[in-house]
């Protein structure tokens, strides 16, 4: 699978290419520099985390990639297109802070929603829904309504919903932020397996240092006022890792470097 | 379709009862059918026995009362007091009983207000007949019932004229027009900005002032009453629909946007379902408003049939029991109308937190 992707000419270019990107919100209290001259590339198959304190622009940056916010300066390309074109081409799946499942739809109909919108046939819808519900281990709950499921299960369903349009790119905005630590650990492990299995490019926003270090190949440390990138850290953990690596010196060292970066940005 | 929805409903309740969602059904089935200690049934039985005794005794007291109207002794009033105490204790015992068995619980939930209502009717009957209250002031329930039964034909015609013709047609037209206007106002912003402030103005119009004008415009028959109902129901529906369409949370809207969904797709798959509870609120409010509007509008000119017409003319002829009979019909029809709307609401918005039992 991987060799096939790399064989294509286009695939050598980065999935996300950001140059000097800025975003200024106009508010009643004057302009707010949400993003300040950010440059960043995300390669195919990467797992990149944005980490930083609240107000550092990490969610805004993800929303710019998803065409949910419009930048006021700089250049951004997603899959070689503008974010607007990428959105209409359904190049990405987006997982929000909350599951945002529609309560009047069963789990399977929720997962099928983006397929319905894209005008994909009923049979194909059913096939894909089954496939991705199995991937997030919810196949036994497909006839249930979202409010009958726990928060962790709801978030897994929303991940299946984001994946079922088969996007190259998965954008996740603090998807496990509202869950308790045990559920979050479990879902982190599952997400890692899912990333290895599907070979997607994942951009993941979080404010949890252990979560970022455990999941990512690259960690983008951001700082607020104005929102900017202050450090980019590459990790080199084995691909088949479990939560145990959080006890290793390498893990602790990287976590330390992230924390230092966050602290320096806070002055 | 209907079957699957009711299945979903029962699924919802079992999942909430059980500790584990997956096996909730199984745990429920293995539980005893009536999970109560026998002591509780003893209390229920005692309460029911007491209520039954009161029922028989009160029945005899009514027979006695009607043989001596306006001339009962102090002993009679003391026994009424005794029945009252017995009913209190009886209802208390029944109301305390709680069970997981759904049908039994439903029966008890109906029984308690039924006893209350019967007791109010009994008091009304005993006081009006016992003290010889003039019928012009307050007829006894028995008088009203007699009049109701003997005038069924007139009542049926009045009901047909007022409810089936004026209320229903006005309600459907008013709610339908309000809904469609809301969709248009949502699509074209100038409509929303221009129309909604006017809507508040029109909904503040006094019905008493509008009704005679509608009679001038649309004639004496049901059309003018339907017009009044349209005016009364249009704006609640319009305002609630507009509010409901905009009640969508940011995240859910962003989700649709990220899919590149069109206006119509977002409307059909997200915004209308979100607006449904608001729509049903308007439908319920309007079911009551429509009854009031049609009856009051008939006070201002009507052919010689209709509930409002009957009330206004029979008051003039001092036939107060006939007025009460019409009120009974209006109350029953209004409750049924509201109840059916509420049932439809439960069926269509079963997923809403307010409907999940």
Image (cartoon, helix red, strand yellow):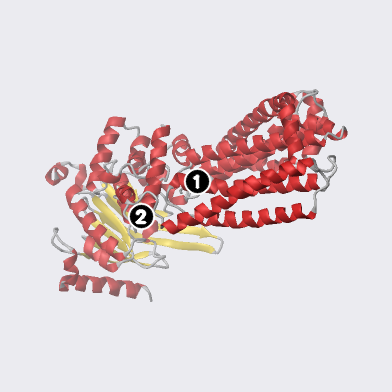
Q: Is residue B296 left or right of residue A158?
A: right
Residue B203, above or below A74: above
Which one is in front, B78 or A168? Answer: B78
The chain that hosts pointer 2 is A
Residue nearest the observer in this picture, A174 or A69: A174
Q: What is the residue that sits farthest to the bottom in this orientation?
A: A267
Residue at mark 2 = A62
From the viewer's side, name the closer residue of B228 and A20: B228
Q: Look at the picture and state if B115 lies above or below A175.
A: above
Residue B191 in view of the camera? no
A213 shown above or below B8:
below
The secondary element bearing badge 1 is classed as helix
Vertical placement of A211 versus B20: above or below?
below
Q: CA distance from mark 1 to mark 2?
A: 52 Å
Q: Which residue is mark 1?
A: B106
Chain to which the residue tagged by mark 1 belongs: B
- Do marks 1 and 2 share a chain? no
Find residue B306 and report its horizontal and vertical position in percent: 75, 27
Graded by Cα atoms within 10 Å as few (under 14), some (14 to 19) or many (20 or more), the crowding at tag 2 reads: many
The picture places residue B192, in percent across and down from the top left corner, at 62, 41
Which label sits on residue B332?
none
Q: Secondary structure at mark 2?
A: helix
**Label 1: how many residues lie within 10 Å, few (<14), some (14-19) or many (20+)?**
few
In this view, the residue in front, A132 or B105, is B105
Residue pictured at 69% horizontal, 48% vertical: B120
Task: Describe residue B113's horizontal placement relative to residue A238 as left or right.
Answer: right
Q: Tell us which disc is closer to us: 1 or 2.
A: 1
Q: Toward which corner of the image does residue B211 lie, by quadrant?
A: top right
Which residue: 32% across, 50% down?
B24
Q: Position of residue B166 (x, y in %)?
A: 70, 28
Q: For the image shown, how many numbered marks are present on the structure?
A: 2
């Amino acid at each position: 699978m991987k060799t096939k992707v790399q064989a294509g000419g286009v695939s050598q270019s980065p999935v996300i290419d950001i140059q000097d990107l800025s975003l200024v919100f106009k508010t009643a209290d004057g302009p707010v520099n949400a993003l300040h001259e950010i440059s960043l590339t995300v390669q195919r198959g990467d797992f990149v985390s944005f980490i930083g304190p609240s107000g550092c622009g990490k969610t805004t940056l993800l929303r710019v990639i998803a065409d949910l916010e419009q930048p006021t300066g700089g250049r951004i390309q997603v899959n070689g297109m503008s974010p607007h074109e990428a959105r209409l081409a359904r190049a990405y799946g987006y997982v929000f802070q909350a599951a945002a499942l529609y309560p009047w739809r069963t789990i399977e109909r929720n997962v099928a929603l983006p397929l319905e919108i894209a005008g994909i046939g009923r049979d194909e819808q059913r096939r894909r829904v089954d496939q991705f519900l199995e991937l997030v281990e919810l196949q036994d709950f497909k006839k249930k309504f979202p409010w009958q499921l726990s928060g962790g299960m709801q978030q897994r369903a929303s991940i299946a919903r984001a994946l079922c349009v088969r996007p190259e790119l998965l954008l996740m905005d603090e998807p496990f932020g509202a869950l308790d630590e045990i559920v979050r650990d479990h879902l982190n492990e599952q997400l890692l397996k899912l990333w290895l299995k599907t070979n997607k490019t994942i951009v993941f926003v979080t404010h949890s240092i252990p979560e970022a270090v455990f999941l990512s190949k690259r960690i983008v440390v951001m700082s607020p006022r104005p929102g900017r990138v202050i450090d980019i850290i590459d990790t080199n953990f084995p691909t088949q890792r479990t939560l145990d690596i959080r006890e290793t010196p390498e893990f602790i060292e990287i976590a330390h470097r992230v924390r230092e970066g966050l602290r320096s940005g806070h002055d | 379709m209907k079957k699957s929805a009711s299945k979903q409903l029962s699924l919802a309740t079992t999942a909430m009862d059980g500790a584990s969602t997956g096996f909730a059904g199984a745990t429920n089935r293995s539980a005893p059918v009536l999970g109560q200690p026998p002591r509780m049934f003893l209390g229920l039985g005692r309460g029911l026995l007491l209520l039954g005794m009161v029922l028989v005794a009160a029945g005899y007291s009514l027979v006695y009362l009607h043989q001596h109207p306006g001339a009962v002794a102090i002993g009679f009033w003391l026994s009424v007091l005794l029945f009252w105490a017995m009913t209190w204790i009886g209802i208390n015992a029944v109301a305390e009983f709680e069970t997981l068995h759904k049908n039994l619980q439903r029966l008890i939930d109906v029984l308690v207000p039924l006893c209350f209502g019967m007791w109010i009717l009994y008091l009304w009957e005993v006081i009006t007949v016992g003290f010889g209250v003039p019928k012009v002031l307050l007829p006894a329930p028995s008088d009203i019932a007699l009049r109701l039964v003997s005038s069924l034909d007139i009542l049926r015609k009045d009901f047909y004229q007022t409810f089936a013709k004026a209320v229903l047609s006005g309600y459907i037209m008013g709610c339908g027009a309000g809904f469609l206007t809301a969709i248009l106002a949502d699509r074209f912003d100038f409509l929303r900005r221009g129309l909604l402030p006017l809507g508040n103005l029109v909904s503040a119009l006094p019905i008493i002032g509008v009704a005679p004008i509608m009679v001038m415009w649309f004639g004496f028959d049901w059309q003018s009453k339907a017009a009044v109902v349209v005016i009364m129901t249009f704006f609640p529906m319009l305002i609630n629909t507009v509010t409901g369409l905009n009640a969508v949370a940011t995240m859910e809207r962003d989700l649709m946007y990220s899919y590149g969904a069109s206006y119509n797709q977002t409307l059909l798959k997200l915004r209308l379902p979100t607006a449904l509870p608001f729509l049903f609120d308007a439908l319920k409010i309007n079911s009551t408003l429509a009854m009031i509007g049609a009856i009051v509008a008939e006070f201002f000119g009507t052919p010689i049939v209709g509930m409002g017409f009957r009330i206004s003319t029979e008051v003039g002829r001092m036939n107060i029991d006939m007025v009460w009979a019409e009120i009974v019909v209006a109350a029953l029809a209004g409750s049924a109308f509201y109840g059916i709307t509420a049932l439809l609401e439960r069926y269509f918005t079963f997923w809403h937190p307010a409907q999940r039992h």
